[in-house]
Image (spheres, helix red, strand yellow):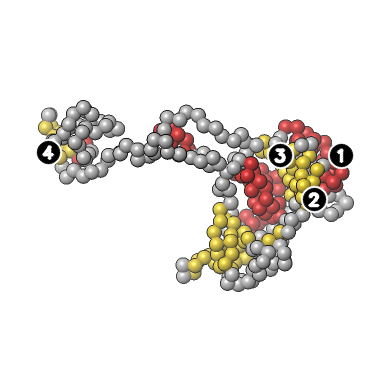
Amino acid sequence: TESRTLSSGQAIRIMTGAPIPQGADSIIPIEDCTVAGDKVTLNKPSKPHFIRKLGENFAKNQTIFSPGETMSPEKIALCAAAGISTISVFKKLKIAVISTGDELKSLDDDLEHGQIYESNSYGLAALVEIYGHEVTRFSNVIDDIDILRDTLNEASKTHDCIITSGGVSMGDKDFVRILMEQEGDIKFWRVKMRPGSPPIFGMWENTPIFGLPGNPVSSHVVFRAIVGKWLTSLTKSKDVNNKFTHAILDEDIKTQEGFTTFRRVELFESNGITYARLKGHQGSGNIAGIAMSDGLTVIEPAAKGRKGERCKIILL
């Protein structure tokens, strides 16, 4: 049919997806026609619909995607439509997640006095997967420096990065910090942020290691604020997993001078304006609070966190 040329008032039948003949400027679906033998009655007026123009998806030599973009099913389909069968991608990192602490028990154990179920490794592993990497969740390590050393050595041999929770503060049994001081290579320790000020980062047997606080909220916030950004920088990608908005503070929020403040908030609208108010008590062990919050404030050190201030919010 592409070799035929139509004049005004003429029509020809073509299949869906076929090139339109020269001179044709509209399509009428078969559903809007009555066919009787070799006679076709058009039941609706023709309109310039249902015609896909050359180059409407992409033009010759057009850049379809830039480095650092995350591939989606739609983007993969577009590559196929462009005749591209293979693309170069960053290899997924293999990341080990290790929780530490005598008080932590696995989910199938019975709790005794002073014990809690270990939850940090589950939340951190889920965050790693959201960022598109492979994760191994190790069993909880008790407060034993030799067992911890062996676990870190094992993880470093088979993983590209290690994330621990607990054991990074100033206590006598904060063995992640102690091991890093004695046998590792510390790049930084402690960050001016609330919650989550004692994280440690360095190298263990040439493997990057992030030591996160043991408090559940602190470990989550540090991952969002630091670890996630590091992961995206390695793949030159956009931090699509930290989505932001802005809101007006509906109440004063306690801050500490010189620190960036991350508080759990819920968002609501009034007269077309988005406001943020604190959600639950702000203790760093209150995992229920962060699970039920809409976002985290990002109150910069120079800001006061006063009611009426415009504040950046990390959406959860």
Distance between mark 3 and mark 1 Cα atoms? 20 Å
Per the model, the C-alpha gap separating discs 3 and 4 is: 69 Å
Q: Which mark is residue 146?
A: 1
Q: Residue at x 42, y 38 (%)?
A: 62
Amino acid of disc 2: Val
Element at badge 4? loop
Residue at 13% across, 36% down: 7
Left or right: 17 as drawn, with respect to 284: left
Q: Earlier in the sequence, mark 3 or mark 2?
A: 3
Give the mark toward the camera: 3 or 1: 3
> Within 10 Å of the Cα at label 4, are there few (<14), some (14-19), or many (20+) other Cα atoms?
few
Q: CA distance from mark 3 to mark 2?
A: 17 Å
Percent of width and height locating residue 14 = 22, 31
Secondary structure type for disc 1: helix
Q: Earlier in the sequence, mark 3 or mark 1?
A: 1
For disc 1, the neighbor class at 10 Å (few under 14, some 14 to 19, many from 20) is: few
Q: Counting residues from the N terminus, which is met first, the one under dot 1 or under dot 2?
A: 1
| Residue on which disc 3 sits | 161
- Residue identifier under label 4: 9
- Choose between 52 and 64: the one closer to the eye: 64
Q: Is residue 106 above or below residue 303?
A: above
Tag 4: amino acid:
Gly
Q: Regarding mark 2 in the picture, which secondary structure is present there?
A: loop
